[in-house]
Image: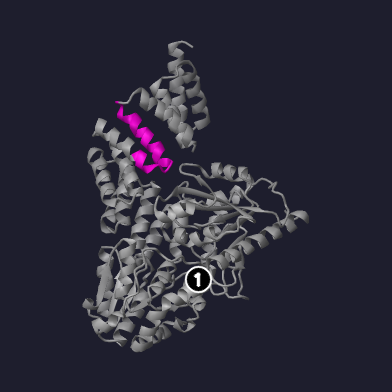
Amino acid sequence: MPASTLQQTFELAVRHHQALRLGEAEALYRQVLAQAPDQPNCLHGLGGVLLQAGRVAEALDALGRVAALQPEEAIYQHAVGMALATAARYDEAAVAFERAVSLNPNLAEAHNGLGNVYLARSEHGKAIAAYRRALQIQPRFAQAVGNLSSALVDCGNLEEPIAYCRQALQLWPDALMFYRVLGWAYRESGRLDDAIDCYRRALSLPNASQVHSDLLFLLHFHDGYDRRRLYEEHARFNEIYGRPLRSQERPHENDPSPERRLRLGYVAYDLGGNPLGRFLLPLLENHDPGNFELFCYCDYPRPDEVGKRLRSHGVWRTLGGMSHEQVAQLIRGDRIDVLVDLSMHSNNNRMLLFARKPAPVQVTYLAYCSTTGLEAIDYRLTDPYFDPVGQNDSCYAEKSYRLPNCYWCYPPPAEAPAVGPLPALANGYITFGCLNEFSKVTARCLSTWCDLLRELPGSRLTLHAKEGEHRRRAVEQAARSGIDPARIEFVGRRNFDVYLAQYNQIDIALDPFPWTGGATSCDALYMGVPLVSLAGETAVSRGGLSILSNLEMPELVAQDTGQYVRIAAGLARDTSRLMAIRSSLRNRMLASPLMDGTRFARDVEQAYRQMWRNWCTSRKSGCL
């Protein structure tokens, strides 16, 4: 092929690449490389196509070749870093990005990539510095603006990213990432109505499924959405995004033998020492390998200790960069029988994967107890407390399967210190506390806590809240209720061991509402701190009821805010009872269904088995 023809073919490949016609671009890049195998721009282009297509290992091969051929070119080192980061090989990615930056200190994209790696390694300060450097070089670098804003929210700075995102939307009014980060910042600061408005403004934009998910997730925090209204909102997501994908569903050829060994697949964005990974741990560590083979599909497995323990069970597929359709093909290739969504509508979920129905039985579980809205998901796991037996389940798109005891199984955290003495004995006053994320503290919730503080003059309240105006607004609301601001203390982001130790400064934990705690509630109880909860109508408002019922402590669950105050005040006035609870609560937790991993795993796997039997029966009767 003449040199001029090679150049024309390369230029055509680039045009296809820019238009995201990846198949055509790949074919043309390979035509050029067949004649000129060391052509660096072509190798770079091919690597980029493969990375966009989710074929990370092939991308690394192509990009590694070009980086080795021209080791002094920063752009090629940057490309290797991008591929390594996509493969969750963060330490190697950092080396590649740092090499790129050393070769070209003004390569903004490499600073941005380095920030992403630092953030993945929870090095927030270094990530923020890297993003700021990228923006010094290239002030209108949209991706760096979004990444910086996201990192600032994640580490507790809320006012600055709100300003950044508002400004960015003046420049890029159709950029979904700015709506997403702005809505997140509003949510974290307790400005739920502003967050809802922000998300709704973005719903008409193309490819807004994740923003729609952000909205659905957020609505559970808001007092104004009951079970029926939540269902209607989720049903709209199914109409827009779910139902059109059902055309891609193909017949499942899985062996319909009801009692054979099943292949289970769990799907999540990231798994490790986060609440999701902690709650999944007892299930994986106690699964029955004789009856179930495990597969875990995870975009970014965390490198922490919990992540390592999780990855020691089953076959793990790292999905970073793969499209929903590619993951669906992978799952079909693995012949998964029961596929379990662990994310629902939380950040970076795979709802559009499940809408393609890659497995014959699909279940949603664990992220939170509600509905996905997707008709392609067959079941939702729950328990008799989240969803009482006999309750009308028409507000769920899925069929409810009630586990016999509890929705969660809590693993003992290795970082937990010993339970300390009752703080009130040394302080001379009661300290109430809520260490849940502040977005769960609604105005009605805070008003109820102010009623409690008035009931018990001298008592104090400790709240977890990132820095920002929301702290001032909370104090102002308390002051309007006659509460001295000095009685309210805020604590910010802390390492997990320091967070757990904070419970040794709290006498009574207060569950927020309408969305109650889960892992946070279990942490408080494991640290000997009794929890007062309010049971509402929605499933997410009944987590405290489920946990406390499994501890045989339902007397700490209220049915209205007045009773909530009476229960908490009565408990606060009985120091002897508080001391007795504190000294016995950890052992009560250990002896309860909440921490019986073996029984819990059998209950969940029995659920999967029954779901599978139902599918086999339907298959044989011709209903599928």
Picture coordinates of residue 390 (x, y %)?
63, 76
Its colouring scheme is one colour
Which residue matches tag 1? 594
Report helix, strand or loop for mark 1.
helix
The residue depicted at 41 percent of the width and 61 percent of the height is 196
Q: Is residue 279 above or below residue 57?
A: below
| 84 magenta-colored | yes
The residue depicted at 36 percent of the width and 62 percent of the height is 187
Q: Is residue 294 left or right of residue 343?
A: right
| Residue 14 visible in the shown view | yes
Picture coordinates of residue 209 (x, y %)?
48, 51
Marks counted in the figure total 1
| 547 magenta-colored | no
Picture coordinates of residue 417 (x, y %)?
34, 69
Report the magenta residues as a range. 72-93
Picture coordinates of residue 170 (x, y %)?
31, 48
Q: Amino acid at mark 1?
A: Leu
Q: Is residue 392 above or below residue 35?
A: below
Looking at this view, name the residue that lies furthest to the right.
621
Give the image quarter of residue 361.
bottom right
> Residue 268 or 108: which is nearer the viewer?
268
> Residue 4 or 235: which is nearer the viewer?
4
Q: Taken as a whole, is the magenta stretch helix, strand or loop?
A: helix
> Residue 77 or 575: which is nearer the viewer?
575
Give the image quarter of residue 333.
top right
Looking at this view, name the residue that lies furthest to the top.
2
| Residue 271 visible in the shown view | no
Q: Badge 1, how many Cα within 10 Å: few under 14, some, many 20+?
A: many
> Residue 7 or 599: which is nearer the viewer?
599
